[in-house]
């Protein structure tokens, strides 16, 4: 084998690694946010590809000589990376969804702020919960766990071995359903307290008709909701650790589906 064919094989192998890692960095929590420059994502992808390349390179893997089969391989690797990052970000999406529910029930639904990380309007409490979850994620070295899963993905799903399984749609559907359930669980303490507050306001409205319940009810619901949220904050931190552990397991279960 001459030097030209060796270089072509190694370059094709490197680009496949780069396609998978760049797909992961497109949707990964924190690194996949819009406020992270594209050049930073591309630079990190190139650096990690350079680190991974000598560890997993195997001359036994055949790289197609024709363009169309090779493009299909690159698309498959990039798709695997996108799904990897998407599964990793579902828990964060559940937190954002919980913030939307809380804002609508407490009375902050009309107060939205622009989040440069997502490039859109986000709820006030949702943004607070998201930033707090991100801090817990980084403090517990969650990014290290995801990087370990990234390296393990090349062992579990070898390059040129990406085959989209039939069970993938069922797996993703179950994760999306679990995302809604997590969002409801996160909001449950506040929702219960606000429901009791509504019942109390209804009783007051019946017993004291002269009271303007709409003037009293709005600030009362805000105070009760924020107080309940503050009381439940330690439990929220503990719930985050459990949720992140489940997220890591979901990533490895996703990779097992591609075997």
Image: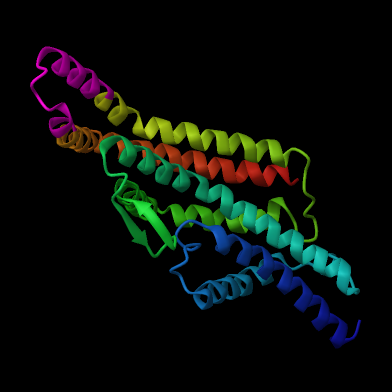
- Residue 21 image point, x, y percent: 62, 64
Which residue does the image show at 36% across and 50% down from the upper left?
Answer: 130
Residue lying at the far front in this picture: please name it.
210
Which residue does the image show at 43% across and 42% down from the upper left?
Answer: 97
* Number of on-image labels: 0
Whether residue 20 appears in magenta in the rendering, the answer is: no
Q: Which residues are magenta?
A: 195-217
The chosen color scheme is rainbow
Relative to 90, does residue 1 appear above or below in the rendering? Answer: below
- Residue 246 image point, x, y percent: 50, 38
Whether residue 197 appears in magenta in the rendering, the answer is: yes
Which residue does the image show at 47% across and 41% down from the upper left?
Answer: 245
**Image-based side of 257 in relation to 100, left or right:** right
Residue sitting nearer the eye, 245 or 169 = 169
Q: Main SS type for the magenta part?
A: helix
Quadrant for the C terminus, please: top right
Residue sitting nearer the eye, 65 or 33 = 33
């Amino acid at each position: 084998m001459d030097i030209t064919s060796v270089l072509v094989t190694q370059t094709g192998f490197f680009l496949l690694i780069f396609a998978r890692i760049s797909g992961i960095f497109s949707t990964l929590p924190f690194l996949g946010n819009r406020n992270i420059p594209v050049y930073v994502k591309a630079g990190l992808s190139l650096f990690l590809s350079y680190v991974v390349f000598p560890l997993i390179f195997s001359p036994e893997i055949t790289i197609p000589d024709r363009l169309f089969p090779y493009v299909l391989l690159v698309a498959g690797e990039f798709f695997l990376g996108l799904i990897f990052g998407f599964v990793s970000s579902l828990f964060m999406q559940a937190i954002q969804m919980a913030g939307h529910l809380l804002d609508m029930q407490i009375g902050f639904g009309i107060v939205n702020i622009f989040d440069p990380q997502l490039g859109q309007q986000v709820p006030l409490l949702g943004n607070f919960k998201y930033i707090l979850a991100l801090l817990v994620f980084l403090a517990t070295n969650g990014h290290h766990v995801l990087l370990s899963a990234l390296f393990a993905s090349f062992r579990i799903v070898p390059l040129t071995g990406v085959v989209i399984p039939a069970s993938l749609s069922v797996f993703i559907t179950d994760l999306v359903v679990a995302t809604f359930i997590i969002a409801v669980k996160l909001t449950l303490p506040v929702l219960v307290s606000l429901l009791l507050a509504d019942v109390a306001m209804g009783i007051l409205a019946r017993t004291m008709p002269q009271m303007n319940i709409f003037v009293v009810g709005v600030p009362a619901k805000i105070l009760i909701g924020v107080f309940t949220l503050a009381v439940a904050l330690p439990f929220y931190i503990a719930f985050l650790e459990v949720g992140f552990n489940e997220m890591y397991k979901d990533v490895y279960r996703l990779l097992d589906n591609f075997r």
